[in-house]
Image (tube, grey):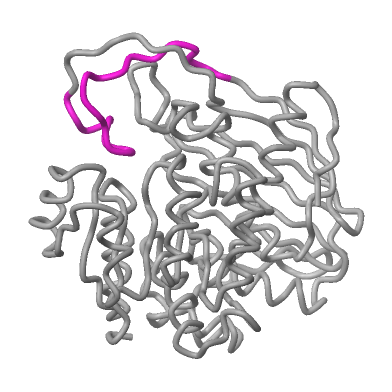
Amino acid sequence: MHEIKTVVIGAGFMGPAHTEALRRLNVNVSGILGVNNAESKRAEAALGLKAYESFQQVLDDSSVNVVHITTPNRLHYQMARDALAAGKHVLCEKPLANNSKESAELVKIAADSNLAAGVNYNMRFYPLCLEAKKMLRSGELGRVYSITGSYVQDWLLYPTDYNWRVLAEEGGELRAVADIGTHWLDMIYNITGLEVESLCADLKTVHPVRRRPKGEVETFSGKVQKIDATEAIDITTDDCGSIMLRFTGGAIGHLWVSQTTAGRKNCLRYEIAAEKNALAWNSEQPNELWIGHRKTPNQLLLKDPGLLSGETRNYVSYPGGHNEGYPDSFKQCFKAFYTAIKAKTYKTKPDFPTFADGHKEILLCEAVLESHRKGGWIRVKK
């Protein structure tokens, strides 16, 4: 894949994460653009990449084939739209846009183009989650009865914890649900093929006032970075929340999301109860899939390419006992994206999360927000 030339937009937490995963795939990452020249130059020195001076300079560079967008959420829509218009394949961080009107427009623009357009729902690419997908979608476990789970973290536990993501004007009106809850919802859809038809949400802002440092803080770095001068700032976005779910096919479920749960660093969990068996998985132990039985002993399936199906084996890089985790999920997501570009299958058979998947998640977020405000069940728009 070295003949493809890629530029990463954004040099905070996600920009370097994308760069590292792309380099492991031998993708030619030729440049990076930060929020300003100072950040671009720091990334240039740290990552050994060319520092672009503006987004327009990236768009005007005819040698660039692909753009990865890892900027604050409010910039995603315009950057994705302009990159497609400039003839670049686009891999965008979630959320795809600020609202469903914008994301629907991006879906149409992508469909009308001859370009690959993906959203980085990387969590779905853990090997054992792909194996769970094979088991459920093949009908091996029978009809799904219920789906429960959570995605919890603790990096915003204290009122002194701060990052641009807590601001509605930067990240959107939803935060915990949009930031991590959508990963869970995307994973469940990818595994089961079941869509959320309606939902009922109850959200909570634990800290209506936070202390903002006089200077920006990179995502997750507040726990290790010494911060002195701060100022009080009002917060309206959600720190945690509970969402009841009704799926196509009659299954029901529940999702708990929190960024204020002490001790949980980055823990996505699900349990799927089906007609014949149940499945459970935890991202903090990602190389084990629990399989529940009624009449025989339960199983613990380990991540081992020799024990997995052929479809899953394509997204396993190491033998059994050689654990694969969070950074590998980026690599495998990007592998699906770049393989589709090379094979020109991104229109007919995309194995990566598409703009349509990104649009679906925004529709879910809008339903969650409406449900919370109205205090009742809301049908998700199609």
- Residue 163 in the image: above or below residue 185: above
Whether 155 is drawn above or below 25: the answer is above
* Residue located at (62% from left, 74% from top): 131
Magenta residues span 205-226
The answer to whether residue 78 is left or right of residue 375 is: left
Residue 214 is inside the magenta segment: yes
Q: Residue at x 31, y 18 (%)?
A: 212
Q: Main secondary structure of the magenta part?
A: loop
Outermost residue toward the left in this view: 45
- Residue occupying the point 51% across, 41% down: 179
Q: Quadrant of residue 83?
A: bottom left
Residue 120, position as x, y percentages in the image = 48, 60
In the rendered image, the vertical position of residue 75 relative to residue 68, given as above or below: above
Q: Is residue 277 left or right of residue 131?
A: right
Residue 7 is a magenta residue: no
Q: Position of residue 119 (x, y in %)?
A: 52, 60
